[in-house]
Image (cartoon, helix red, strand yellow):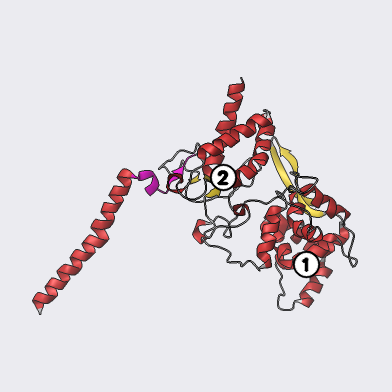
């Protein structure tokens, strides 16, 4: 009995030693010796070079992060806000109107007229803004009130999307106690509504007080080159293009629009995909090149060609190009943009 127990204990100890100590240590040493950059998370510094120093890292080649400026290429949409601790998808089906609204919000600022349109290649955004300003009231309610009543989730999303938006609604709450009291009376289960709960009531009242406008960000010089963003009534801008594209499209279903790459408007399964297709990147080139040309005061055509060349240099497909589509690592390309554009200026001199 003792002999069998001793043998089992030796077997247990040996198994624990091999599986929990020797094997992990061997794998760790192998990875740190031959693939240290990858083993450390494929971190990159602000020049796009792999680094193992966390203090120098600005991101990882393996994890997407948000880029919103016009001078940068934008990653795929993320259902988790690019939060690596909450990887996942929205799981919205094709018949879920929230998915349709999210796609519409992304399309509004970027989509262009198609081949069959007299305005072929032009952005649809200015037409959406004109339609917004000229849209007649329906049933005594302005276009903003109609939008909020038709898409309450979109109205609530606008409030939650930015702290300044929420603060703007909170200021409105202080001066519109009657509307807030009426809302609470209609929703007795929510005696202390949050800012987003009041979104529809806010927009209905806003539409009456500021017809033909939408609360959007306006920048003012604050100190030096720093700009202060303030929410004010506006009648143009990306907020209008994104929020009202769906309503504009429903009233103009026959207008021919250019198709966009699917990965520009559809999130990945993880919400953290660091790549976009080359086709997606090329679709964004005009916006990126225009911004860099304005900032560096260089010839737009030269800047555009340099950025296109950079994209083709950085493009890579799985298994050395044997399968799949050419892909662009968004972080790497964005980090390389400044040096590439600076090189154009040096060549010109």
Region of the chain picked out in magenta, as a range: 35-45
The disc label shown at residue 150, or none: 1
Q: Residues within 10 Å of mark 1 (few under 14, many from 20)?
A: few
Quadrant of the frame with the C terminus: top right
Q: How many marks?
A: 2
Closer to the camera: disc 1 or disc 2? 2
Which of the labelled discs sits on residue 348, or is there none? none
- Which residue lies at the image location 71% right of the left edge and 66% below the top edge? 153
User: From this viewpoint, which residue is outermost toward the front?
Assistant: 116
Left or right of 108 in this view: 338:
left
Q: Are marks 1 and 2 in contact (CB under 8 Å)?
A: no
Mark 1 vs mark 2, CA separation in Å = 36 Å
- Image position, residue 280 (x, y; %): 60, 47
Quadrant assignment, res 144: bottom right
Asked if residue 37 can be seen in this view, the reply is yes
- Of residues 187 and 126, the one nearer the viewer is 126
Q: Is residue 274 magenta?
A: no
Between disc 1 and disc 2, whose residue precedes? 1
Identify the residue under disc 2: 278
The residue lying at 79 percent from left, 69 percent from top is: 180
Quadrant where the N terminus lies?
Answer: bottom left
Q: Quadrant of residue 90?
A: bottom right
In the rendered image, residue 218, in percent from the top left (x then y), is placed at: 76, 46
The residue that appears at 48% across and 46% down in the rendered structure is: 317
């Amino acid at each position: 009995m003792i002999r069998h127990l001793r043998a089992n204990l030796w077997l247990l100890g040996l198994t624990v030693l091999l599986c929990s100590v020797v094997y992990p240590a061997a794998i760790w040493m192998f990875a740190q010796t031959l693939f240290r950059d990858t083993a450390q998370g494929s971190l990159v510094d602000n020049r796009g070079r792999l680094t193992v120093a966390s203090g120098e890292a600005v991101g990882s080649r393996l994890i997407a992060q948000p880029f919103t400026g016009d001078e940068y290429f934008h990653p795929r949409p993320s259902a988790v806000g690019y939060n690596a601790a909450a990887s996942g998808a929205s799981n919205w089906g094709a018949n879920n109107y929230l998915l349709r609204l999210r796609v519409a919000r992304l399309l509004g600022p970027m989509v262009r007229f198609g081949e069959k349109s007299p305005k072929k290649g032009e952005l649809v955004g200015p037409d959406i803004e004109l339609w917004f300003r000229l849209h007649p009231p329906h049933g005594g309610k302005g276009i903003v009130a109609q939008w909020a009543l038709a898409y309450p989730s979109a109205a609530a999303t606008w409030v939650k999307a930015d702290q300044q938006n929420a603060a703007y609604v909170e200021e409105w709450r202080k001066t519109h106690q009657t509307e807030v009291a009426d809302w609470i009376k209609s929703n007795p289960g929510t005696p202390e509504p949050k800012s987003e709960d009041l979104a529809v009531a806010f927009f209905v009242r806003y539409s009456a007080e500021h017809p033909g406008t939408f609360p959007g960000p306006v920048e003012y010089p604050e100190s030096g080159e720093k700009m202060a963003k303030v929410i004010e009534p506006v009648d143009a801008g990306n907020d209008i293009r994104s929020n009202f594209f769906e309503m504009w499209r429903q009233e103009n279903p026959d207008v021919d629009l250019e198709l966009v790459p699917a990965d520009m408007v559809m999130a990945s399964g993880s919400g953290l995909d660091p790549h976009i297709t080359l086709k997606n990147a090329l679709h964004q080139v005009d916006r990126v090149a225009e911004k860099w040309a304005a900032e560096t005061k260089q010839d737009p055509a030269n800047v555009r060609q340099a950025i296109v060349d950079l994209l083709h240099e950085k493009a890579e497909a799985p298994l050395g190009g044997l399968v799949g589509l050419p892909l662009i690592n968004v972080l790497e390309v964005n980090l390389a943009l400044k040096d590439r554009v600076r090189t154009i200026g040096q060549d010109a001199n």
